[in-house]
Image (tube, coloured by chain):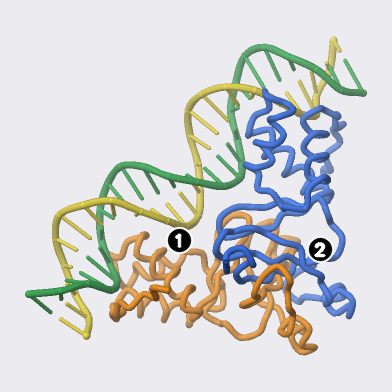
Chain colours: A orange, B blue, C yellow, D green
DNA sequence: CTTGCTGCAAAGGTTTTGCATTGTT
DNA sequence: AACAATGCAAAACCTTTGCAGCAAG
């Protein structure tokens, strides 16, 4: 197993992206992250935003919520579930009461090794139902 | 509310697509559905496959599992969860023990009206871990 | 005959990537 | 000085869509 041995470097791009994600609870898409971080770092590129988000995700420091349209990112990796509005695509936090009962955390699967799980609820958000 | 009043028509495309999905437990992507159905209906187009899959999904007769890479489709809409291999992208069925406890089914959200929910487990499938 | 559905092909949107350059360590 | 990370732009990918012709009811 050739685990990557390369040393990571700290850059302004990484720290602004992570800082922005930590500061919001809106589960922004990569495009939103790009637009927001660009306000502070006008030269940042979309490619960098995608690369950095994927790296943080691989390290488990942020999580992605995959929707029909695109991926949304969340720097909160504590136990909680998400509500995805099928009309506007927005993502909201909801309490994951199911983690309390421990069933999901201790789940074993015959098909492979479970690393983590996600619970998504779908419907129409308050704003979309007028 | 202008609910659609148009009469749906039955076509070979729809019935082959639905029949194929019902016959497999492999959670194929739209591309796979296209390739498989094309064996029986050589003139079918990708656009039709995507349209038909989306229509079945909207009617709730099939469900989509959204992954990082693409959507996978499942004609089994009974209570069960999925395991998504983060290496090869394949989707497998797993038992959703959590539905038994009723917590998720009766979940209410302040952020909107819940219509349904999905539980996804992530990790490496047996085949990818050699 | 009406009009929903399809095939085709083009377009749309998101995400990835190659490469020269920049900037951390 | 090494080489990881970035910016830029093109490309890759998945999915949607406009439109003319086809076909189910």
Left or right: where does residue A90 sit relative to residue C16?
A: right
Query: Can you say whether B100 is above or below B64 in the image?
Result: below
Inter-mark Cα distance, 2 to 1: 28 Å
Task: State the SS at label 2.
Answer: strand
Q: Is residue B26 above or below residue B100?
A: above
Categorize mark 2 by other alpha carbons within 10 Å: few (<14), some (14-19), many (20+): few
Side of A39 where A63 appears, left or right: right
Q: How many marks?
A: 2
Which residue in the protein does label 2 denote? B115
Q: Whole-percent x and y of residue A101?
A: 80, 88
For this view, does A97 lie left or right of residue C17? right
Task: Check residue A31 in the rendering and tell me which mark sits there, or answer none.
Answer: 1
Q: Are marks 2 and 1 on the same chain?
A: no
Query: Are dots 2 and 1 in contact, CB under 8 Å?
Result: no
Q: Residues within 10 Å of mark 1 (few under 14, many from 20)?
A: some
For the question of whether residue A130 can be seen, the reply is: no
- Of A80 and B87, nearer the camera is B87
In the image, is B92 to the left or to the right of A59? right
- Residue D17 appears in which quarter of the rendering? top right
């Amino acid at each position: 197993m050739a685990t990557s041995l390369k040393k990571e470097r700290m850059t302004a791009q990484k720290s602004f992206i992570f800082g922005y994600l930590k500061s919001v609870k809106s589960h922004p898409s990569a495009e939103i992250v790009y637009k927001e971080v660009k306000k502070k770092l006008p030269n940042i590129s979309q490619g960098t935003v995608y690369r950095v988000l994927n790296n943080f995700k691989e390290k488990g420091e942020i999580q992605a919520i995959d929707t029909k349209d695109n991926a949304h990112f969340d720097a909160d990796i504590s136990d909680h579930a998400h509500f995805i509005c099928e009309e506007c695509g927005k993502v909201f936090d909801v309490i994951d009461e199911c983690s309390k009962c421990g069933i999901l955390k201790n789940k074993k699967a015959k098909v492979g090794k479970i690393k983590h799980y996600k619970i998504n609820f779908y419907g129409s958000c308050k704003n979309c139902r007028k």
